[in-house]
Image (cartoon, grey):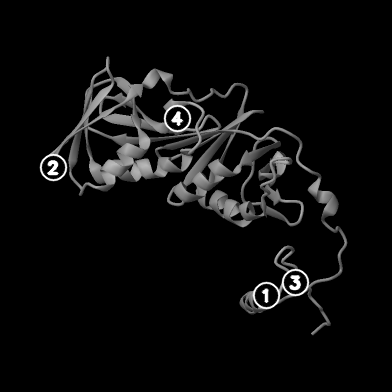
Amino acid sequence: MHFIVSSNHLLRHLQMLSGVLSSNNTLPILDHFLFDLAPGEALISASDLETTMTVKLEVRTEDTASIAIPAKMLLDILKAFPDIPLTFKADPDTYAIELVSDAGKYKLTGANGEEFPKTPALEGGSSVKIKASTLVTAINRTLFAAGSDDLRPVMSGIFFELYEDSLRFVATDAHRLVRYARTDAKAKESSQFIVPKKPLNLLKGTATSAETVEMSFNESNAIFTFDDVTIACRLIEGKYPNYDAVIPKDNPNRMTINRIDFLQAIRRVAIFANKTTHQVRLRIAGS
């Protein structure tokens, strides 16, 4: 099998996928990028078993084949190239790979693409389309409040609440809570699920230039599709805390303040805060 592709074009796509790679994979195959070739295109995937990301790019090939290529080595090689055409040749029996360019030839050993984990098919799921800008904004405004406590995994992601009249995104670490609601985005039926941090970070980094994102999901998995990118992830199991119970329903207290002035004041005072609690006390005495 062989294909030809621009070095910079390939590097940009692989750098998108590199956010999926883990430094402590349990399976050696997960240290590879999977290349699935079809005439005129390549689907390239990275996975850590919990999250799988796939991108599609145009290449010059007539082959239909798959091979896994060591991720770190390939990234390091591509970073050393200017923008030139590269020819990849692979032996389907030995998985020996030869990378040919005007600057020389480079050899590395790949792996059987059939060993790469398959993306789970969604059975009995639902789907909803949402503006990419809406989803990215929701992630940016909530993800910082998600927890990192392994003993409370349900708090380590964003809680998606889809309703027929609105969408809600909730995150909390038990000390702070953020609820972001949009009434300009709706779902056909009500659904709730918790998405982990990694796929959310991938989304906010790669979906910024997309128009819409299609979210497909069932009880255990979710798939986000936009442009030539697909991100599949395993949802967090468990029941999300009843966050509504801690939000005051009839709170008469309101304060309007200049955001920049407030942030600057907090930064100055925070220098003297307790290094463990980082607590800052506010005294509000009216206008």
> Secondary structure under badge 4?
helix
Q: Nearer the viewer, mark 1 or mark 2?
A: 2
Mark 1 or 4, closer to the camera: 4
Whole-angstrom CA distance, mark 1 to mark 3, is 8 Å
User: Up-down: is 14 above or below 118?
Assistant: below
Marks 1 and 3, the one that precedes in the sequence = 1
Distance between mark 1 and mark 4 Cα atoms = 44 Å
The residue under label 2 is which amino acid type?
A: Ala
User: Mark 2 — residue?
Assistant: 103
**Residue under numbered circle 3:** 280
53 relative position to 148: left or right: left
Label whose residue precedes the other's in the sequence (1 or 4) = 4
Q: Answer with mark 4 or mark 2, whichever residue precedes in sequence.
A: 4
Q: Earlier in the sequence, mark 1 or mark 2?
A: 2
Image location of residue 245, percent across then percent down: 85, 50
Residue 151 sits in which quadrant? top right
The secondary element bearing badge 3 is classed as loop
Q: Amino acid at mark 1?
A: Ile
User: Can you identify the residue that label 4 sits on?
Assistant: 30
**Counting residues from the N terminus, which is met first, the one under dot 2 or under dot 3?**
2
